[in-house]
Image (cartoon, rainbow, N blue to C red):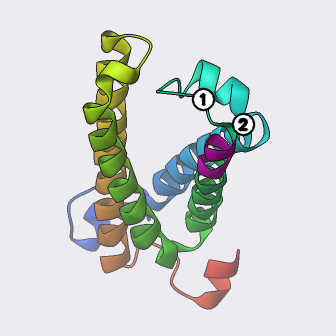
Amino acid sequence: MRRDSLPERGGPRVISERAMRAVLVVIGAYHVITGALALLDPGTFFDQIGRYGVENDHYVGDVGAFILAFGIALLMAAWRSSWRVPVLGLGALWYGFHALNHAFDVGEARSDARGIADTGAIALGGAFLAYLAWAAAKLAAVGAGPSSGKEEAR
């Protein structure tokens, strides 16, 4: 068994440190790319991803700036374990409120089916981020994550 798994430390296996880092890098990169697209090319973002209501390039760019910042925070959290629970918790809240907003605006999507699918996907994303926040707290509680300042800086 790997040294970074939780059963070796007396707790149930949730996720290994290596897997947590990999997941954070993947979802961080996804948010960096998505945020950069919305910030740098809001028209394409609106046409391909966020077609709800009336197009507003400035507002789409503002949302892109937030998504980009969240992606960078996720990438930082991959190597700074103390960032994980707060960043992932914030993401879970954001996705939860985002899903509620979409639920109220299902009729504004390209189709009702797309609106329902988007709402469900965003809600699942929020649930996944909440799970990761919980798993990060478990990792920190058993000392599986980096704990010294030296490891944090790597």
Q: Amino acid at mark 1?
A: Glu
- Badge 2 marks a residue whose secondary structure is helix
Give residue 41's position: percent from left, percent from top.
Answer: 77, 33
**Residue in front for this viewpoint, 1 or 139:** 139
- The image quarter containing residue 33 is top right
Q: CA distance from mark 1 to mark 2?
A: 15 Å
Q: Which residue reaches farthest bottom? A: 149
Name the residue tied to disc 2: 37
- Give neighbour class at mark 1: few <14, some 14-19, many 20+ (Cα, 10 Å): some
Q: Is residue 73 left or right of residue 115?
A: right
Q: Tag 2 or tag 1, which sits nearer the N-term?
A: 2
- Badge 1 marks a residue whose secondary structure is loop
Q: Amino acid at mark 2?
A: Leu
Q: For residue 142, say whether it is visible.
A: no
Q: Which residues are magenta?
A: 58-63
1 vs 2, front mark: 1
Give residue 128's position: percent from left, percent from top.
Answer: 33, 45
Q: Residue at x 36, y 36 (%)?
A: 122
Q: Is residue 131 left or right of residue 38?
A: left
Instruction: Let me know if residue 115 is in the magenta part.
Output: no
Classify 22 as above or below 112. below
Classify 116 as above or below 25. above
Name the residue tied to disc 1: 55
Q: Which residue reaches farthest right? A: 40
Give the overall secondary structure of the magenta segment: helix
**Residue in front for this viewpoint, 105 or 122:** 105
